[in-house]
Amino acid sequence: VAPPLAALFLVGCGRRPSVERLEWTSMGTIAAVQSRTAAADARTGAFVRVQDSFVRVNAEFSRFDPQSTLRRLGRVSAFGQPCWEAAMWLREASEAAFDPFWRGVGVPDFGAIAKGFAVDVAAETTADADDLLIDLGGTVKAVCGDWTTGVRSPRDDGLAAVVTLRAGE
């Protein structure tokens, strides 16, 4: 009796889908999306929506692109308003320790908060995806499923921590 049960257990454990990863540069850093879905069309659609979301946020907040909404208007559109308001709240709450206007002149720098906003926008556009992990320069969010990832140690090549990210948290 034991051999068939052991064989059944091993078959059940070996059926994890492979992870597909797409990596590119966005907003001055490494962007990536990972999927464990077996459906190639669904995976490709999710990858495209994440990329489009990052492009849209960059077009809103880039201080480097003269055509960005922020550079052209000195403010953001209704789309970017939640990020702007969060930045202003953080500026006030931190007594300007966090300050998008720290440069004093020129275009404000929302890079620190806009990347998190971009990940949130991408997560909203892919809420129907199966087993998706979005990463923009270390700002990481699980859209569906649980993902275990490591945090690299700043002192050596090892891991400082291993964390499990859960969708919706």
Image (cartoon, rainbow, N blue to C red):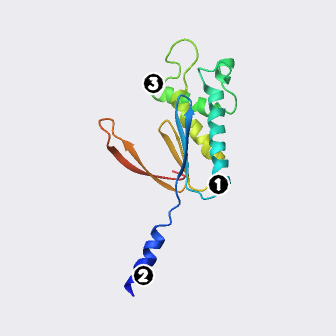
Q: Position of residue 139 (x, y in %)?
A: 49, 39
Question: Which of the pair 52/23 is nearer the observer?
Answer: 23
Residue for point 53% across, 57% down: 145
Q: Is residue 42 left or right of residue 147?
A: right
Q: Tag 1: residue type?
A: Ala
> Which residue, given by chain and number where applicable, does mark 1 sit on?
40
> Which residue, given by chain and number where applicable, does mark 3 sit on?
95
Query: Of label 1 and label 3, which has the lower sequence position?
Result: 1
Query: Of label 2 and label 3, which has the lower sequence position?
Result: 2
Q: Where 81 falls versus 158 (above or below)?
A: above
Q: Position of residue 163 (x, y in %)?
A: 40, 50
Q: Where 146 falls versus 113 (above or below)?
A: below
**Is label 1 in a helix, a strand or a loop?**
helix
Q: Tag 3: residue type?
A: Glu
Res. 5 mark: 2
Question: Which of the pair 131/101 is nearer the observer?
Answer: 131
Query: Of label 2 and label 1, which has the lower sequence position?
Result: 2
Check the picture and name the quadrant holding the N terminus.
bottom left
Q: Residue furthest top?
A: 105
Q: Can the viewer see residue 96 in this picture?
A: yes
